[in-house]
Image: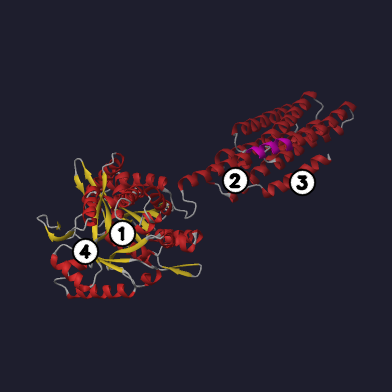
Amino acid sequence: MASIIEKLRGIAKTDSIVAEEVRRSLVETLFSSSTSLGIGALSGAACSTAIALSSGDPWLSAMAVAITVTGLLRVSHAVFLHRPDNFDATDSARSETVYEIGAWAYALLLGLMTLLTLLRTDEALYHMLSSVLTIGYAAGICGRNAGRPVIAIGQLTLASLPVSLGLFLSTDPLRWVLGCVTTAFIIGMVDITLQTYSAVLKAMTATQEQKHLTARFERLARFDTMTGLENRGAFQERLHAEVAHAIAGDQQLAVFWVDIDKFKEINDSLGHPTGDKVLCAVARQLNSLVEGRGSVARFGGDEFVLLLRGHRASFVQEAAQELMRALSIPMNIEGVSLQVTASVGAAIAPVHGTDADTLLQHADLALYHAKANGRNDFCLFEDAMEQQFLELRSLEGALRQAIENDELEVYYQPIVDLKTGQITCCEALLRWHHPELGSVSPSKFIPIAEATGIISPISHWVLARACEAAAQWPEEVSVAVNMSPALLKDLHLSHMILSSLYTSGLAARRLELEITETVLLEDNAQANSLIREFQRIGLKLSIDDFGTGYSSLTYLKKYKFDKIKIDTSFIADVTRSKEARAIIHALVGLAAELDMEIVAEGIETETQLGYVTGAGCTAAQGFFIGRPMPRAAIAERLAAQARGERWDAIDESGEMRLTA
């Protein structure tokens, strides 16, 4: 008995903390079978009416009427009034209370009917009929309503205790024994009900937890955990449906692909937690922008895709302007004001595609062009972009094949000391002769190599070939190799250079690395570290294409460069632009003060050569002095130089020719 009381206390405690969804599910078990409820009501009405009509007792007749009416009301409530589909917690509690009152009233009426039958009649058949009905009902209800044990135990008690009382009030000792058995039956059924409730509760709790877990995994599968936006998969599903709807409804649908500019630098300089906060802030801005007229998703990293609906032809340009303005607003991240810009590409359905995949591909192509334009820009897809893309992909495949087939070749262009007329350095230049396309310009295939990541193996190959060739030249002649900005992000670059020097036997002082100003402008920590490491190794460093718009005297002070190469644009204008001449004179003076060599690139005429010589440039390079040539040809020219022969006249090809 103490155990049962303890269990009852446990029920009250559990019921107060059980999840609302589980509680509602338990309440629904009361109404899950209207059939059993109807059978119970019909059985009670039939038996009580039969006893009342047969005995003619007015009290029993009144009980039969009450039992019949109560049973009908309970069945009506369960079948017609209870609607679980849109019940909330309040409705569920109200429905449970109504059921509880009806259940207890019906059980009490059955118990009282049995008690009155035992006390007011002497017919054993009446006693058996009423007792079997009531005890059977009490036993059945403990199983049916075990999900709400308070109701079940209340019905059991209200139905069975009057039966026990009626048996105890009899003068027959055998009925006393039956009364004791009935009382024990009540205690046993209470224990069974509590055990059943415990099992049902565990099962429903596990089911509910499984539902929550399933819902969580479904959300994880469809939404980005950091920003709360839809992910790529969910957005693509939405886009498929939206495209079909837009085409059917004669609407326009724009897909905007957004990429945050230089997001990696934010992560590197301020840390990934700050970068995550920036992504969340951008997500909020984009969500606010598309509210009520589209949707936004995070496609991974720092890329977002927006979907906007519109009717007017100009809505895309207007939305793009609104988008760029929204992204340009400074954001405050932990007290730090950050100015974030983005590159945006867009495509419109059905103009630029009638399926989701095509639209996304075209928006991505437009984004590529926005980045190529200098970032912080918007581009709308054009058909020419796709053709250009296909050509680039074709060229990429051919380039990979060229690497495998050894179609690439290193040419060498001489750099001449203007005082002595001697070649002091040769610049290694990569050339590609395609079997079908012919000679492919480096300006076409080098950017592809940088974008696809194959610049590293190509550069390693060029370094190895250049060092191998230079090792066969006279000691006073060095070789210059261009360093791609993308290559300076390679952690293994210094090992690559050391490997080439070691394998070829070339002294480090005879290898010159040419670095563009854009690398210094980005002020990348890794690139800066590599530049200082190159200087420790003993390599020579030169700034290539100096004066192209990014020039800063700061990094001339920051690094000890050996050489400045004046950009060809200044040399080309030297005869017609006094500004170009003034800049060349200024650079020559600056180099002299900093004890640096200064090379004039792009010398194509005798006039240009004469001017840069007179201006004080220390060296010159260009087609007039010597075109890029294969390894054997440059070796022959250097050998001729070693024999004391000079190249001081122009031959029919336009190059300086050898004279005795």
User: From what the image shows, is residue 60 above or below residue 474?
Assistant: above
- Crowding at dot 4, Cα within 10 Å, few <14 / some 14-19 / many 20+, comes out as some
Q: Which residue is mark 1?
A: 476
Q: Which residue is mark 4?
A: 421
Residue type at mark 4: give it. Gly
Q: In screen coordinates, is 487 left or right of 72?
A: left
Q: Which residue is mark 3?
A: 9
Could you say whether the residue bearing mark 3 is in a helix, strand or loop? helix
Which of the two residues, 153 or 319, is positioned nearer the viewer here? 319
Measure the alpha-carbon separation of dots 2 and 4: 92 Å
Residue 46 horizontal/vertical position (percent): 67, 29
User: Which quadrant of the figure has residue 475?
Assistant: bottom left
Which residue range is magenta in the image?
194-203
Residue 201 painted magenta: yes
Measure the alpha-carbon separation of dots 2 and 1: 86 Å
Which of the two residues, 548 or 411, is positioned nearer the viewer here? 411
Task: Give residue 21's mark.
Answer: 2
Q: Which callout, 3 or 4, points at the residue further toward the start of the chain?
A: 3
- Crowding at dot 3, Cα within 10 Å, few <14 / some 14-19 / many 20+, comes out as few
